[in-house]
Image: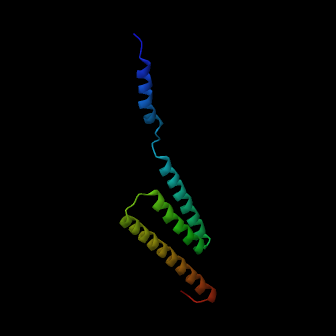
Amino acid sequence: MGVNPCFLVLLLALAAPAIAQPTEPVGDANCNSEKAAIEREMELARSKGQMLRRRQLAESLVAVQARCENLSPQQRRAADIEKLEAEIRELRKDLDHAEEELRKMKGKPS
């Protein structure tokens, strides 16, 4: 008793998509790597004191997140607010550091 060729074709047709599917969608992997690269560039720019470059990268990161994540407008707004708050904290920290350096240069005790 032989196996019907139509049955084999049908079996392969149904099994192929399940076998070929990656564990993580390619789009998500691409978005995650793109976000990670931007975050690394932001940290590098911050460490070099390139605040304008870091701000531009932060805007790029928000754009990538908006493109990659299917967020509702309220979630996107909350994420944008959180990003801006984090950026403000970083800028304040950098400003405090710069003011401390200025005091040292002028010879004033802190």
Nearest the camera: 98 or 85? 85
Q: In the picture shown, does residue 52 fall above or below 11?
A: below
Nearest the camera: 3 or 75? 3
Image location (x, y in percent) of residue 2 = 42, 12
* 19 left or right of 75 in image: right
In which image quadrant can residue 52 be found?
bottom right
- Extreme residue toward the front, this view: 6
Q: In the picture shown, does residue 10 fall above or below 83?
A: above
Q: In the picture shown, does residue 103 fall above or below 44?
A: below
Q: How many marks?
A: 0
Image location (x, y in percent) of residue 79 = 41, 66
- Extreme residue toward the top, this view: 1
Image location (x, y in percent) of residue 42 = 56, 66
User: Which residue is at a point 60% across and 68% down the rendered structure image?
Assistant: 45
Q: How is the image coloured?
A: rainbow
Image location (x, y in percent) of residue 90 = 50, 73
User: Which residue is at a point 52% across and 76% down the rendered structure image?
Assistant: 91
User: Which residue is at a point 60% across and 66% down the rendered structure image?
Assistant: 44
The quadrant of the rendering that contains the N terminus is top left
User: Which residue is at a point 41% across and 31% down the rendered structure image?
Assistant: 14
